[in-house]
């Protein structure tokens, strides 16, 4: 889980900062507080930085989406294991203690997987929000 999270936080902060800088630059130009050549030079560098960050963000979003797909598959497998466990218990293939231990373990894994998926979905929503607010 941590591999995407640090990248997400870094790219989010850097993009927000770059968009604020671009807005400030445009504001300074509108108030005639810098020359056109200076503005264009600074804007060019800033736009290159934003482009680089946007590319990185798209790559990260793609990786996060792939991780969500993996987690959905894991959830399906865990749910199948839970159903199989229930059948084994009902069929008296497991005693109650073994059943309860395995069920608790599977449920803990299921909840952790769902929690990670929710965190990634929330992060993807934040990425989309940055897109909207930057326009």
Image (tube, rainbow, N blue to C red):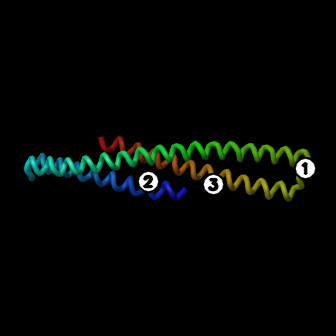
Helix, strand or loop status at disc 2: helix
Q: Residue at x 39, y 57 (%)?
A: 10
Q: Picture coordinates of residue 42 (x, y %)? A: 17, 51
Does the CB distance between marks 1 and 2 fall below 8 Å? no
Quadrant where the image shows the C terminus? top left
Answer with left or right where residue 114 lies relative to residue 64. Answer: right
Question: Of label 1 and label 2, which has the lower sequence position?
Answer: 2
Distance of mark 1 from mark 3, alpha carbons? 27 Å
Residue ID at (45%, 48%): 60
Task: Kindly indicate whether the residue at mark 3 contacts the one at mark 1 (C-beta within 8 angstroms).
Answer: no
Q: Which residue is mark 3?
A: 112
Quadrant in which the N terminus is drawn: bottom right
Q: Secondary structure at mark 1?
A: loop
Checking the image for residue 116, the label placed there is none
Residue under the image location 52 percent in, 58 percent down = 2
**What is the secondary structure assignment of the residue under circle 3?**
helix
Q: Position of residue 115 (x, y in %)?
A: 59, 52
Disc ID at residue 93: 1
CA–CA distance in space, label 1 to label 2? 46 Å
* Disc number lying in front (3 or 2): 2
The image shows residue 104 at horizontal and vertical percentages of: 75, 56
Q: Which residue is mark 2?
A: 8
Tag 3–tag 2 contact (CB < 8 Å) = no
The residue carrying pointer 3 sits among few (fewer than 14), some (14 to 19) or many (20 or more) residues within 10 Å by Cα, namely: few
> What crowding class fits label 1: few (fewer than 14 Cα within 10 Å), some (14-19), or many (20 or more)?
few
87 displayed left or right of 123 = right
């Amino acid at each position: 889980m941590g591999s995407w999270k640090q990248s997400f936080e870094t790219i989010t902060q850097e993009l927000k900062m770059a968009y604020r800088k671009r807005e400030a630059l445009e504001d300074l130009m509108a108030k005639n507080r810098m020359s056109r050549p200076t503005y264009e030079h600074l804007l060019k560098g800033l736009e290159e930085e934003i482009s680089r960050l946007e590319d990185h963000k798209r790559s990260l979003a793609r990786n996060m989406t792939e991780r969500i797909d993996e987690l959905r598959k894991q959830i399906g497998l865990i749910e199948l294991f839970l159903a199989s466990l229930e059948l084994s218990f009902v069929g008296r293939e497991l005693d109650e203690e073994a059943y309860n231990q395995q069920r608790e373990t599977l449920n803990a894994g299921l909840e952790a997987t769902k929690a990670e998926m929710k965190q990634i979905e929330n992060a993807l929503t934040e990425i989309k929000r940055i897109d909207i607010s930057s326009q």
